Amino acid sequence: MPLADSPHIPNGRWLRIIPPTIVIYIIAYMDRMNISFAIAGGMDKSLGLSMTTSGLAAGIFFFGYMVLQIPAGHIAEHGSAKRFILWTIVAWGGLSFLTAFVQNAWQLLGMRFLLGVAEGGIYPAILTVIGNWFPTKEIGRANAFFLMSLPLSTLMTNPVSGWIVANYGWRLLFMMEGGLSLALICIWLPMISDRPEEAKWISEEEKKYLVETLRDEKTNREISFKQSNPRGWSYRQLFADKNLWLMVLLFICYTSGQYGYSIWLPTLIRDLTGKSLTTVGWLTALPFISALAGLYFFGALSDKTRNRRLCTALSLAGFGGCFWLATLFPQHVWLSFALLVLTGVFTKSMQSPFWAMPALLFPPGFAGATRGVINALGNLGGFLGPTLVGWFATMTGNMRFGIYALAFLLLSGAAITMLLPPITAGKSDPVEQVTIR
């Protein structure tokens, strides 16, 4: 029996690589999003922020977030993602702690921008680590498990953030959660290795399987891309590739909806239900419980069908459609809330099949930087979405029109996804031709 098909290959990678990446990103995402509870809990009044400025403070993070994306992807693929992420933990934990001491809007905007710079390289670096450890037939599920950190962060930290703000104020929120971030060093250093060849804990059987399988997949892709472009690839050619810009554009549509939904969800539920912030913290956790199911379902489905394109499009369409439906019944509080929970199923689920596509569209040596480009420019939606909702709320006095705009962007992203080439739909995948030696 070929080694890759053996049911006896140890699965240590699932227990040693995935959990620390989940924990790291739970805390990183918490520090990124806790401003939503700080705003709902009085930061806006304390610093004299309008709704538009509050949305800007939430969204300016993503301008800083762009800075290290491409360097992080390149360093992770050609150097050490482990060391790179170590230093980003120190930077973002310290900045989150210092945000507790801001005194005006300009200081808050500055700290949020710098936090974005510090966190900017984590995502492409972690995706590269996962790509170094999981073969093609596992990558959808591996991405899905890692990306569960996003709803888990909200599920685990929203109630705590709501309770801290309600009882101790928003400044202590930043101090406590920033300190927790710095403690992550004790998890990251002993657990993670960049590649199977470097891990001391891995069995020889698992190491042999991973090294040979991943090497053969890489070789097969190199041959395929060399045949299609004998002169070889360059970063100039990468930036001229239309598929890169299609992925950037659809990711902007997604992040606009996702961050618009996440940033304003506490305020939306508070206004809808009239409950206290502590109760709102628990209620906002429910949509992200449903997101766990969506993440795994679409990740496993994309591994089974290899149709990453369709799974991405269906997820975006479900997100936009359900979010729009949630605005249609304002007099029926719990029906509207139930639709917001249903929307949660789709809020993260596109990312697992989506992040499996760069390795299909771009050659080895460029996939890491490509992830950085897509994540850097695509996360401008993290500025656009919250700001758009805040602007509509200021101009009309109703958040509903901002939600309409986000739903339109999400449905547009689904349509753009279907323009990607057939290989992302599981057709003519060169990896299918790999023979494990």
Image: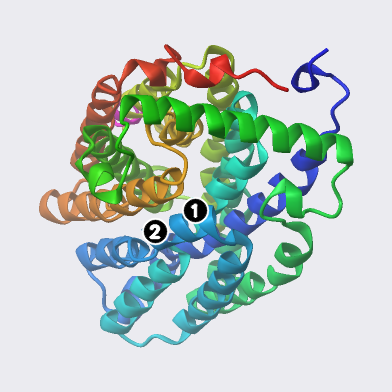
Residue depicted at x 51% and y 33%: 352
Within 10 Å of the Cα at label 1, are there few (<14), some (14-19), or many (20+) other Cα atoms? many
Above or below, 33 relative to 145: below
Can you say whether 307 is above or below 215 in the image? above
Q: Amino acid at mark 2?
A: Gln
Instruction: Determine whether the residue tagged by mark 1 lies in a helix, strand or loop.
Output: helix
Quadrant of the snapshot with the C terminus: top right
The quadrant holding residue 193 is bottom right
Q: Which disc number belongs to residue 160?
A: none
Left or right placement of residue 243 versus residue 94 in this view: left
| Residue carrying label 2 | 69
Residue 158: percent from left, percent from top? 56, 55
Q: Residues within 10 Å of mark 2 (few under 14, many from 20)?
A: many
Q: How many marks?
A: 2
Above/below status of 93 relative to 314:
below
Residue at the (28%, 38%) spot, across then down: 244
**Residue 214 drawn in magenta:** no
Task: Look at the numbered disc 2 and give the secondary structure of its residue.
Answer: helix
Q: Nearer the viewer, residue 150 or 19?
A: 19
Q: Residue at x 48, y 82 (%)?
A: 100
Magenta span: predominant SS is: helix
Which residues make up the magenta segment?
A: 323-327
Q: Which of the 4 quarters of the picture holds residue 163?
A: bottom right
Residue 123 disc label: 1
Q: Position of residue 293 (x, y in %)?
A: 60, 28
Is 292 or 267 nearer to us in this picture?
A: 292
Which scheme is used to colour this image of the protein? Answer: rainbow
**At 24% across and 43% down in the image, what residue appears?**
237
**Distance (Cα) linking label 1 and label 2:** 8 Å
* Mark 1 vs 2: CB contact within 8 A: yes
